[in-house]
Amino acid sequence: MKLLMQLADKQGKPLAFVILLSMASALLTVGVIAFIQYRLLSQHDLTPSVLWQFVLLLAVLLATATVAQVALHKLGHQFVYKKRCQLIKKLINTDIEQIESIGSARLLASLNTDIRNVTFAFVHLPELIYGVVLCLIALAYLAFLSLPLFGVSVLLLALTGLFGFSLVNKISYHITQVREFDDKLYQDYQSFIEGRKELSLNPGRAKRYFNDEFDPHAKQYRDQVTRADILNGFAANMANTIVLALIGLNFYLALGLGWASFPVASSFALIILFMRTPLMSAVGSLPTLVTANISMQKLEDLSLSQNNTLISQQPVSAPFEQLHLQQVVYQYRADGDEKPFQVGPIDFTIKQGELIFIIGGNGSGKSTFANLLTGLYRPHSGQVFLNDQPVSLETWPEYRLQFSAVYSDFYLFHQITDGHGDNVDNTVIDEWMRRLEMAHKVSHQDGYLSDTRYSQGQRKRLALMMAVLEQRGCVLLDEWAADQDPKFRKTFYRELLPLLKERGVTIIAITHDDKYFDAADRVFKMDLGQLSELNSNNQRHTEEALSSIVS
């Protein structure tokens, strides 16, 4: 199985040690049975020393079994911990385009369900390893007692195993279906949470979405998991029945046909009965391990970055002197025969300390341009130059370090850090709290905001503070002023932006506030994926551009 193979690959020596401990525990278990048979059932040598030997044997068995189980649990949970950390690091290093292609619902399902399934598998893994090892050693002891009875027992168990293998395949199929519907249910959960306002305003839509989307997915999940549980229950009951049948068959062969003596038949019965519980536990753990195997495959199918190391802290880089996009093109995938939407080719140059405004209607390509400029998207053609040096695939992460941004779909973190993840001086934080008029709303301590649950406009102010404190050469703001009141909007354009410009920060603001276009050094318009600079001396062109946006 994939799970065991990865564990053996990553933790081969510790796993081998655990298996050896399990084998020792199983040998001691069979030794206890043999001790009972040959010493305690003997009426000629029942001395106090025999009892003490039995107690000592039990103590060694308890210690060995406990150490083996604890070691395997620690090994398994350490593997899960490393797997979880590697997954998050790969997610951090994966391009935004790939993450958008995967979808947040599928990612959340993997981070939650798949990691949980792998954890559960390691909880049951000791039962499987101990059960298998104990059964093998017990069978070897049965072969020592009577080869004919052993041969019949192995034949019956082998036939049962073949039938059980087909059951495991069926269980695996249903569990795979369960995992597929798990993804769909996460998508439905996301729709209910993110669309709660629309569903509250339109109960008819809520009812239809529930009936047409969520309910069928929930029923399919229920049906598939029910079938898997039924087959698993049947497999466990079958194993229990086979064990009992094997005891009866061995007594019949030994006493009815004279294949063995009564003591040997009794020993067979005792050992098989002792095997029953570990065997049932091993069979019961199989669905959990099958589920974990499917989850491991799901995690691999995410196609995340193979780089599982975080970018090391780098020395503070000076702001760029000039940035140039030369014939940069980005093209979206097309559905069917439709012509794909294309942004570019774009020729765009910006120098340090400039204040640039980008205007354009919805769907014109402004956000795509913002992602291209900040390095979140890699252009499909064209070249990006930083200080007249071409940006290569290897230097792309370093290029991104030139930017901080407040996107329209920004996320506000509690932590306050600079551009390298270090703490920021409290006096600097307090300065920007005052400038953004948030000092009376939110406090900070030990590098953390006291809260982030504010109005959208106030959250944007805190996000702007975070971007400024990163001390990057360029700050991109996507419709930042759209959620601000008129008074603070004026403060933003007339005071904050000039202050940042005075401090050498390059600012690119996507905006529709034509009232403040005079604050910009240059104004560009994005239309149908094409970027063009508006002539500040030609008022007529500017008015036409604004009227087209409004219309």
Image (cartoon, rainbow, N blue to C red):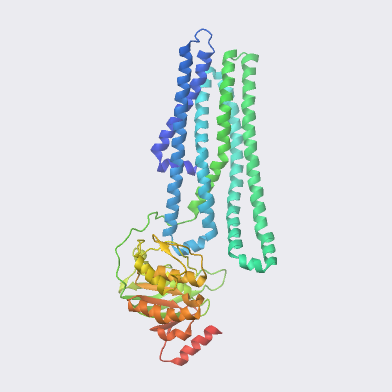
Left or right? Give the position of 198 relative to 14: right
Residue at 54% in and 84% down: 550
**Against 172, is 516 above or below?**
below
Residue 435 image point, x, y percent: 40, 74
Residue at 53% in and 85% down: 548
Residue at 47% in and 92% down: 540
Q: Residue furthest top?
A: 44
Most foreground residue, 335 or 71: 71
Q: Is residue 23 visible?
A: no
Residue 197 image point, x, y percent: 62, 67
Residue at 47% in and 62% down: 98
Tell me the quarter of the picture where residue 265 sits: top right
- How many marks the image carries: the answer is 0
Q: Is residue 125 visible?
A: yes
Tell me the quarter of the picture where residue 239 sits: top right
Q: Residue furthest front?
A: 440
Left or right? Give the position of 184 relative to 404: right
Residue 103 image point, x, y percent: 53, 61
